[in-house]
Image: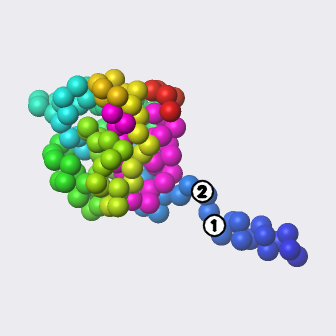
Amino acid sequence: MVAALLAFALAACGPVPADPGGTLERVTGGTLRAGAVSSPGLIETAERVTGPLARLVERFASDRGAEVRWSSGSEEELVSGLEKGALDLVVGGITDRTPWADRVGVSRGYPQIPGSDGRAICFLVPQGENAFLTAIERFLDAEVGG
């Protein structure tokens, strides 16, 4: 009896980490809606989105069988896009000292990203999308070291 209750309780919890908004599932085999904040040496948004961060996002999407649809803007505009569900990911010269941590999910900092000049660069995701954030961090750990 106790084993049955324990199994039921564990099943009710669902997979951990979870994505209440289903970001990882929706992106996989679909479209990754990425926002780019121009940051010299890391990501440029002039004619098209380029640079080390853009390449990382493109490789992450490719590993998931996804295409990237880029938007560019200020951090404030793009964080608002994450909050409204219009974006899945935001990258730029955003560090582990970001003021947005109370409004969105923030990856660990990665000072090894080319062009970071030792700054701990973070990726932003919608708040609570922990499976998606975990997938990004595992990818970054493998690509640039964690």
Q: Position of residue 90 (x, y in %)?
A: 29, 45
Q: Is residue 122 magenta?
A: yes
Q: Residue furthest left?
A: 46
Residue 50 percent across, percent down from the top left: 23, 27
In this rendered view, identify the residue nearer to me: 1 or 74. 74
Does the magenta segment cover residue 37?
no
Where does label 2 land, which residue?
16
The stretch in magenta equals 119-141
Does residue 13 lie above or below 76 as drawn? below
* Residue that numbered label 1 is attached to: 13
Q: Is residue 79 visible?
A: yes
Taking the spot 71% from the left edge, 71% from the top edge, the residue there is: 9
91 is higher (above) or lower (below) than 54: below
Name the side, left or right, on which 127 lies relative to 139. Answer: left
Residue 124: x and y in percent read 34, 48
Q: Is residue 116 above or below residue 28?
A: above
